[in-house]
Amino acid sequence: MTSGTVIHWFRKGLRLHDNPALLAAIRAEDLTLRPVFILDPWFEENSKVGGNMWRFLVQSLEDLDESLRQLGTRLFVVRGKPNEVLEKLINEWDVKMMTWEIDTEPYSKERDAKIEKLAISKDVKVETFSSHTLYNPEQVVAKNKGETPLTYQKMLGILALLGPPSRPLDPPIKLEKESKIPSSDLDKSKYDVPSLSELNVKEEELFPCLYPGGEKEGLQRLDEQINMKRASWVRNFEKPKTSPNALSPATTVLSPHLRFGTVSARIFYWKLEDIYKGSKRSQPPVSLHGQLLWRDFFYTAGATVKNFDKMKGNPICKQIPWGDDKELLDAWAHARTGYPFIDAIMTQLRREGWIHHLARHAVACFLTRGDLWQSWESGKEVFEELLLDADWSLNAANWMWLSASSFFYQYFRCYSPIAFGKKTDPDGSYIRKYLPQLAKFPDKYIYQPWEAPLAVQKAAGCIIGTDYPRPIVDHSVVVKDNMGKMKKAYDAGKAADSGKKDISGKRKGEDDVSSNNDKKTKK
DNA sequence: GCAGGAGTTGCTTGG
DNA sequence: GCCAAGCAACTCCTG
């Protein structure tokens, strides 16, 4: 006979392995375990969520439900605002305890604080755990005297002081009888995992699923990518040397699983460590370990810098007078820029939900400081909708990086929408795959088809300006203009900095940004 | 306070 | 095909 319920609340961390909060719920004596996932309308109301993303989520929830049923419980998917549905469930289920994984995003922090308050008022015990990243961002910042590390090398130094990340925890293998739910709960269809149609996704309009969601899929992918047979690939991995336009991904594509937490970063880290052990291997930042550390680096910044996903009010972000041209943004987002390399990447993104890291560089640079001079925030929103792995912190951080708004400042190093792709795909096979209307162009013109003589265009069956757009901007012209604008914006920032210093003795950011993580405010 | 070196992943030209 | 230099020159960190 049990005397109440313990809820484990799944949000990210859609897995059984390496899930300390779930294990804590299971350990709670004499309480029935009811694992919950909340379909929170906030996400739909406040951001566009693409069909591929919904599909990945549904697959992950189905897998989770299946695994939980094998343990003698199930996933309870509830629909509604977290504070409302949880209050109802706490009463209905006689909840005594709740556990969840710490989430560092602003909305999540606010939401969780509310729930914690609710729990206290209802006499419900709450236990939370950090397990989405290798290190707890708060600990990293604490180790750096309360300052957010703003360079990767600095981050590495702090992590060296903290030592290696924790080992992953094993998944639960069984539940005590008291933890199991009554069999009548197993059939309650109102808690079933939603179908795609319930989520207003037209499945028939989606492209074939290349990267399925779910813990089992994720762990299988991890095994396929990271194993002793591939030891030399694992040990020699250098991110900048992988190809952005390979026809099948040159990297592991584990990022969607890390984003949803269907694969734990720590299990990934330690699996790599096992293969590294005693052997010569590449090093951070370019190694596979290095990739996981980038994730922690950006998570730490995202968790502690104010207004991290915006330009205004963000103490680490350069203030740049970006243009606001919806047509340019739309052309970029819908693969109509007239630059085949850019349009092929954006086509792959929309269809498949994943593009290579360097492909992201190319299109992000193109949209912002390179060619179209549009705000990185608008590009970030498009990625948020389309990328399976769009993690709030990483997405904002990388967009700031590529637009030379933060972290990276060498704005005169600019990707060419023509030259960059040629290095790894001189024949343009990648372009031909995603933009079949250009497939018959000779290699010579595949990256700049507008330069092909009309006879060549006719022979290729594709007239530029009719069957495929002309370039919306002239790269060789705008790239110079934009570098000039960047210089101006940087100089204006410096002037504003010293101006503020002159007037108040303080530096920029101190008056309007109260973040204690802005190292500039510390004099 | 200042100089010098480093910073995941540029492009073009010339040898 | 490879490598180095020039492009015009950023910020952060360290000593």
Image (spheres, coloured by chain):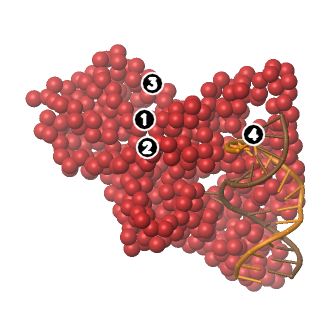
Chain colours: A red, B brown, C orange
Give the mark, 3 or 4, whose residue is nearer the N terminus. Answer: 3
Q: Nearer the viewer, residue A482 or A133?
A: A133
The residues tagged by marks 1 and 3 sit, at their Cα atoms, a distance apart of: 11 Å
Q: Is residue A96 above or below residue A323?
A: above
Q: A206 left or right of A383?
A: left
Q: Are marks 2 and 1 in contact (CB under 8 Å)?
A: yes
Could you tell me if residue A494 is visible in this image? yes
Q: Is residue A289 above or below residue A426?
A: above
Quadrant for the C terminus of chain A in the image: top right
Q: Nearer the viewer, residue A226 or A119?
A: A226
Q: Crowdedness of circle 3 by 10 Å Cα count: few (<14), some, many (20+)?
A: few
User: Which dot marks residue A113?
Assistant: 3
In front: label 2 or label 3:
2
Residue beneath disc 2: A132
Instruction: Name the subunit of mark 4.
Output: A
Q: Give me the residue at 85% from left, 63% from top.
A: A476
Residue beneath disc 4: A318
* Callout 3 amino acid: Ala
Q: Secondary structure at mark 1?
A: loop
